[in-house]
Amino acid sequence: MAVRRVLVTGGNRGIGLAIVQELLKRYEDTYVLLGSRSLSAAEQAIAAMPAEHRARCTPLQLDVASEASIRDAAALVKEKFAPLHGLVNNAGVMPSDFDLKSGLDINVRGTVLMCKYFEPMLLERIVNMSSGSAPNFVQKCAPEKQAMLVRPESWAQVESAIQEMENIYALDHSKVPAAFEKAGFGSFAGISVYGFSKACVSAFTYTYAKEVPRLITNACSPGFIETDMTQHFVSPGQSAKEAGLKTPAEGAEVPIMLLMEPIKTTGKYYGSDGKRSPWDKYRSPGAPEYTGE
């Protein structure tokens, strides 16, 4: 039986761990590299697995906020595990509205660098974890900003939007909200940095699929999932289910589908129900599937 090796970043907890566990459970031909910023956390996650799963899973120290860490991990994987069937860029953060650096370094640049360093050893798939916050963010932007984030002509076009956002955040905190809105990025409230960073991930997916057509590269939203990032959405005395949060296993469904199941589309964005969705407008799960570009 041919072995399909896959790498999942941020695989030691939350949705990432659920993806790892479900891959090992459903596909006996799969070997998983569990990427984690903390090697001990990865080892602990694997130690808790059934013995038959532990035998097909290896911890990999990988901090996606560090290019050196990504480069070292890629060298190790190339030497010992390549080629890989696919890569799931799952690692991410939901930063505060004044922590643009974390949002960009981990959610955006980490995804870009992972694709750069691991592309040569990939055989078939890349799945980039975006969010429903991405189209929610884009639909509130001015038309000229939407043009930079929706089906951009190149990644450089998106980088210009990133640079503009960084210039805004270089201002005194008191001036950021007004400058943010004046620049056409929508209203400054809630999870603006997170939405912007995930919109950039989606835009990168679109441009990367065109640049590297030999790979099937798609983005997806896992849904509103109970993880460390979403705990603040749960009110005191309220259960995660009552708050509308789904389980990490439910969040793993779409990325697993895009990684392992027969699929021909590339450079697209999928909603949490596994259906294609628009880049610039939120599509509710169960709504008619998007059929545009």
Image (cartoon, helix red, strand yellow):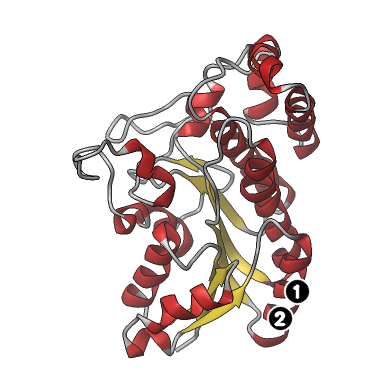
Q: Say which of 279 and 164 sits in front.
A: 164
**Residue bearing mark 1:** 72
For mark 2, give the secondary structure. Answer: helix
Hey, what amino acid is under mark 1?
Answer: Asp
Q: How many residues crowd mark 2 within 10 Å: few (<14), some (14–19), many (20+)?
A: few
The image shows residue 161, relative to residue 50, as above or below, that is above
Q: Which mark is residue 189?
A: none
Q: Is residue 288 left or right of residue 188?
A: left
Label 1 residue SS: helix
- Residue 101: quarter of image: top right
Disc 1 and disc 2 in contact, CB within 8 angstroms: yes
Left or right of 159, for residue 136: left
Q: Position of residue 6 (x, y in %)?
A: 53, 72
Picture coordinates of residue 279 (x, y %)?
A: 53, 30
Q: Quadrant of residue 20?
A: bottom left
Specify the quadrant that holds the N terminus. Answer: bottom left
- Amino acid under disc 2: Leu
- Relative image position of residue 42 (x, y in whole percent): 50, 75
Q: Nearer the viewer, residue 213 or 143?
A: 143
| Residue at numbered disc 2 | 76
Q: Residue at x 42, y 66 (%)?
A: 17
The residue under the point 73% across, 27% down is: 169
Left or right, 214 with reference to 257: right
Q: In the rendered view, would you say 116 is above or below 40? A: above
Q: Give the quarter of the image for residue 26.
A: bottom left
Residue 86 horizontal side relative to residue 153, left or right: left
